[in-house]
Amino acid sequence: MPMATASSSLHGTAAALHGVGAAASSKPRSAAPVARSVRVAAAARGSGSARARGGMVARAAVAANAVAAAESKSGGHELLLFEALREALIEEMKADPTVCVFGEDVGHYGGSYKVTKGLAEMFGDLRVLDTPIAENSFTGMGVGAAMKGLRPIVEGMNMGFLLLAYNQISNNCGMLHYTSGGQFKIPIVIRGPGGVGRQLGAEHSQRLESYFQSIPGLQMVACSTPYNAKGLMKAAIRSENPVVLFEHVLLYNLKEKIPDEEYICCLEEAEMVRPGEHVTILTYSRMRYHVMQAAKTLVNKGYDPEVIDIRSLKPFDLHTIGNSIKKTHRVLIVEECMRTGGIGASLRSSIIDNFWDYLDAPIMCLSSQDVPTPYAAPLEDATVVQPAQIVAAVEQICQ
């Protein structure tokens, strides 16, 4: 089978499984005079540019009013998460001719989850480049492009496939700025879908956060809403550092109203999702929604959990996390990553090192089991943390 046909067939299968598309900064963009590909630049120019129930209710009312006021002021528009990522790409590619996209079927097919739909028609084939099925090659090409002054966005059709590019991500992306004595910057974004989907099997249900977290020089962020997906994508593109953006396959169809005005999200800040008094729950990506589902049950049981979406997986926002721990004195970490060597293990270690004196109970961590993800749906669910487990863990911590 020809390579292009095989690639399209694989993407069609992925799309059928999930359905298609399954604090702000005002700092102006710097336009550093960097060398760039003449052909890419020319193509760009051609394409245009409470511990008491009453306290909890009061805080919820204040938060609801703030959200309503913000939406009425800005108007905003509704987007699905994959559409928010796409909007971020379009805005950045219009603003900066050095921004380009590499990956399998990212061009006229529009990507396996349609994040790049229509970009080839807008910006041309040189800036939205379809590649062969060779992750090591096109990731290495992205590193080289970044060294020469471009700002490439490399899409892995599935994050599990990026294991084939681990050498380029580790030895090149993360280290070249250091090993070159500061002669090169690597402003590259590596992004794509990952996490446990719906019966995608072990190889397509990878959580690679734990693989990449030990690479020096690499930043990692995980989006969880359309708002922060767009804001984090824009910030990652503008960063001078290599950034890995983790997207979850089951969150692409989340819908949210986002501002019409331009905004970005800080790559190193956590998000306070729900203020509380009794326990700090730290989570990210899809598990944010399992935690919030559990929080409804916990509130009915008289508990007041504080929920933080850490978003920045490397480095951790220890300022936000520490302030919460100093208030609640109890911590529960909820992740979809594997238990052994996962993000939760690193986060627990950081909390013990920095905030041990503020803890009134042992830190608990709920993670996925250390097994390949099964294909059978009941077994697949059994390997991932469920809301009932979160409720039981909070009850145990708060005894």
Image: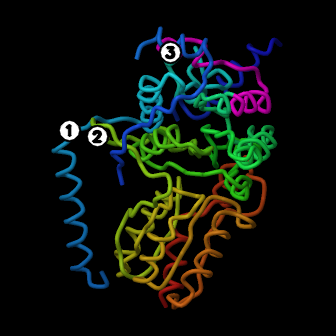
Q: Is residue 131 above or below residue 56?
A: above
Residue 44 image label:
3
SS of the residue under disc 1: loop
Label 1 vs 2, first from the N-terminus: 1
Q: Residue at x 52, y 69 (%)?
A: 388
Q: Is residue 301 above or below residue 379?
A: below
Determine the CA span between mark 1 and mark 3.
31 Å
Which residue, given by chain and number where applicable, does mark 1 sit on? Answer: 75
Which residue, given by chain and number where applicable, does mark 2 sit on? Answer: 259
Using a 10 Å C-alpha cutoff, classify the residue at mark 1 as few (fewer than 14 neighbours), some (14 to 19) or many (20 or more). Answer: some
Q: Which residues are magenta?
A: 120-144
The type of residue carrying mark 2 is: Pro
Pinpoint residue 361: horizontal percent, then vertical percent: 55, 89
Q: Nearer the viewer, mark 1 or mark 3?
A: 3
Q: Residue at x 47, y 85 (%)?
A: 329
Q: Is residue 184 above or below residue 208?
A: above
Q: Is residue 138 magenta?
A: yes
Q: Is residue 146 magenta?
A: no
Label 2 vs 3, first from the N-terminus: 3
SS of the residue under disc 3: helix
Using a 10 Å C-alpha cutoff, classify the residue at mark 2 as few (fewer than 14 neighbours), some (14 to 19) or many (20 or more). Answer: some
The type of residue carrying mark 3 is: Ala
Marks 1,2: beta carbons within 8 A: yes
Label 1 vs 3, first from the N-terminus: 3
Marks 1,3: beta carbons within 8 A: no
The type of residue carrying mark 1 is: Gly
